[in-house]
Amino acid sequence: MSILAVVPARGGSKGLPGKNLAALGGVPLVAHALRFAAACPEIARTVVSTDSEEIAKVAREHGGDVPFLRPAGLATDETPIWPVLRHALDALDPDGDIFDRLLLVMAASPFRLPEYVAAMSGLLDAAPDADGVVSACDPGFDPVWLCVVERDGRMEHLVPEGARYERRQDVPRVLRLNGALYLWRTEFVRREPESWFNGRNRLYEMPRSRSADIDDAFDLGVAEAMLAGGLVTLPWLEGSA
């Protein structure tokens, strides 16, 4: 199968200004995504979708392919990711005869490994009725059991089903979407106009240690500490195993 990988890298991050260019282990986050994709033999082409000339320049300096600048209307705080991906696919494969699958590679999740793409591709191969495969991980706690809200001054379970359980061990296991990798059939991306949630998606479980999702300075600091302390290694960084 021919996979198009898209690295979205908008210039206007609010939680961590300049996030996509923030350095981790001395390498910008957008470059981590590019190095990851370059290490995946399943990927036929990787492109960066950005509205920022600065991000485009840095991406190209790290070998990135930036064939267009994203329209301003697809780069606002409110813009969901789905139209961004559809725009990239329409621009790069307008006739639908080049790529069979689209892989979303989020720059804010730098700890994933190349073998995950092969595993996700295998899951999609084995499930002809599925539209895609989405990465997830153990959240480290069970939201059915532990997540609560305050209503009218009283604590209540966020998930009403949680009130049924008296022991943590009895609560159904839950995974969280970790934002690292999303793989879809391009036919589905073209067909579905609204959201990938409307598709038939399988889950691929990644280790929690590989599921960093950098959204603010704290997240970046934790990721830097994990990398510096050897808790994770990255094959595209010099000296990593």
Image (spheres, helix red, strand yellow):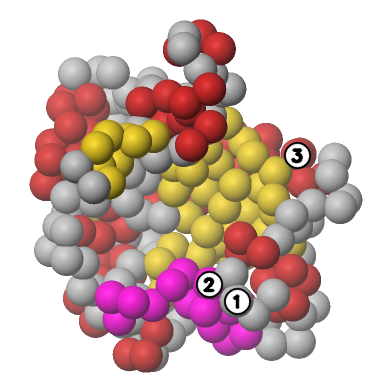
The answer to which of marks 1 and 3 sits earlier in the sequence is: 3
Residue 103, image x, y percentages? 59, 58
The mark tally for this picture is: 3
Q: Which residues are magenta?
A: 76-91
Q: Which residue is mark 1?
A: 194
What amino acid is labelled 2 in the image? Trp
The reply to whether the magenta stretch includes residue 183 is: no
Taken as a whole, is the magenta stretch helix, strand or loop? helix
What amino acid is labelled 1 in the image? Glu
Q: What secondary structure is marked by label 1?
A: loop
Q: Which residue is mark 2?
A: 82
Q: Which residue is mark 3?
A: 123
* Residue 143 occupies quadrant: top left
User: Are the residues tagged 1 and 2 within 8 Å (C-beta)?
Assistant: yes
- Give the residue at x 28% y 25%: 239
- Give the residue at x 75% y 39%: 123
Q: In the displayed structure, does residue 214 sit left or right of residue 195?
A: left
What amino acid is labelled 3 in the image? Leu
